[in-house]
């Protein structure tokens, strides 16, 4: 594998041309603007979003040098500091989206200010459980990348590229380590893939696709279960493993790539089978007591720390599967009714954005 210092220079090269597929395409943004104008419910939701976003114009970025969430218990000072800094992520995406909706330069300028602050101060450490928190920043950059000053563009793309290559060259990726094949790798693939498609970097996207195929083969089983479920005895981790794979599969599909939802590995495993295995538990037809036989000490530590949902024997709650349903419905519209049932079918701004991407 080529080393980080070499690949940084290559990462800025564009081998393929992808539009704004990680976030919203121009056509989808146009549909959103039309809905805001012509649909009363969407307009009402937008006005709430607009009001919140307007406040961000007077706020200052709060970047952190190193994101630290993985392996830390609730209340840990490092985790608390990180969580406070990560509040920037939703602000960054909101500012980018508001700019796309209104074309008002002040939102673009503020979004660039936030992104540039993170690009200057945040140092990637190759930990996918930490880096997975950067999704909104990547999506925001995808929304505004064609409209920002060259200096800021170079700085932000360098940061995103370094983040992707730190993941690829991380010691946590080495063969023989559990973090090379469990949910860590699912998040690693999603981080590298979304950055690759955002930066139009074919080297990153090719790496992602090759490794996604091997991950599906190693991490998922033909009966629909997963390595993470076996190790943690928890639907929570089956879901945490599937969520990034589904998000990545959507990005690849939107780039006119292979359908990785339906893709079957040589041993017969697939994302589709692992989603369908989960559905009876979401519907309540089957029950599961979480973490009873987990092999991971951190799960027991969180239980001792009285963190909700981690006590051995806690019953799986279908609402925890909403992240999977939100993404899987993209490939299987028949799951829409189940999504409505579990979510309560509320009208939300996020639901509006999700539905723009549906086929």
Image (cartoon, grey):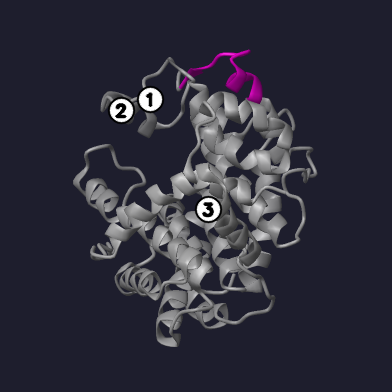
Q: Return the mark for residue 307.
A: 2
Quick one: label 3, few (<14), some, or many (20+) residues within 10 Å?
some
In this view, the mark in front (2 or 3): 3
Query: Could you tell me if the residues under marks 3 and 1 are in contact, i.e. CB atoms within 8 Å?
Result: no
Which residue sits at x=65%, y=19%?
280
Secondary element at image label 2: loop
In this view, the mark in front (3 or 1): 3
Image spot of residue 287 (x, y percent):
56, 14
Q: Earlier in the sequence, mark 2 or mark 3?
A: 3
Left or right of 83 in this view: 217: right
Q: Return the mark for residue 36.
A: 3
Residue assigned mark 1: 310
Which quadrant is home to the N terminus? bottom right
- Total numbered badges shown on the rendered structure: 3
Image spot of residue 84 (x, y percent):
25, 51
Quick one: label 1, few (<14), some, or many (20+) residues within 10 Å?
many
Left or right of 163 in this view: 209: right
Which residue sits at x=32%, y=75%?
120
In the rendered image, the vertical position of residue 234 relative to residue 134, given as above or below: above
Left or right of 150 in this view: 109: left
In the rendered image, the vertical position of residue 282 relative to residue 96, given as above or below: above
């Amino acid at each position: 594998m080529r080393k980080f210092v070499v690949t940084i220079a290559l990462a800025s090269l564009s081998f393929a041309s992808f539009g704004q597929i990680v976030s919203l395409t121009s056509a989808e943004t146009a549909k959103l603007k039309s809905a805001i104008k012509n649909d009363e419910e969407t307009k009402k939701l937008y006005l709430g979003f607009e009001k919140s976003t307007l406040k961000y114009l007077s706020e200052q970025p709060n970047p952190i040098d190193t994101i630290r969430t993985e392996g830390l218990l609730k209340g840990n000072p490092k985790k608390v500091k990180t969580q406070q800094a990560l509040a920037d992520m939703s602000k960054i995406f909101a500012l980018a989206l508001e700019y796309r909706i209104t074309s008002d330069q002040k939102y673009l300028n503020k979004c660039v200010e936030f992104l540039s602050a993170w690009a200057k101060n945040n140092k990637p450490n190759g930990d996918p459980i930490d880096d997975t928190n950067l999704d909104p920043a990547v999506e925001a950059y995808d929304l505004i990348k064609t409209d920002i000053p060259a200096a800021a563009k170079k700085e932000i793309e360098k940061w995103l590229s370094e983040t992707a290559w730190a993941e690829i060259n991380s010691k946590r990726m080495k063969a023989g380590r559990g973090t090379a094949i469990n949910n860590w790798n699912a998040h690693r693939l999603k981080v590298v893939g979304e950055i690759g498609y955002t930066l139009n970097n074919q080297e990153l996207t090719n790496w992602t696709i090759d490794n996604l195929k091997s991950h599906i083969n190693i991490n998922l089983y033909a009966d629909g279960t997963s390595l993470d479920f076996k190790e943690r005895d928890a639907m929570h981790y089956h879901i945490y493993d599937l969520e990034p794979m589904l998000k990545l599969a959507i990005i690849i599909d939107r780039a006119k790539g292979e359908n990785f939802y339906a893709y079957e590995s040589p041993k017969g495993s697939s994302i589709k089978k692992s989603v369908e295995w989960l559905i009876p538990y979401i519907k309540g037809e089957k029950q599961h007591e979480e973490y009873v036989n987990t092999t991971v000490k951190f799960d027991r530590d969180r239980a001792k720390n009285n963190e909700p949902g981690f006590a051995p024997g806690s019953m799986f709650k279908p609402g925890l599967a909403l992240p999977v349903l939100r993404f899987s419905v993209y490939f299987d519209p028949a799951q829409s009714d189940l999504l409505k049932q579990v979510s309560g079918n509320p009208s939300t701004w996020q639901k509006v954005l999700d539905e723009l991407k549906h086929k």
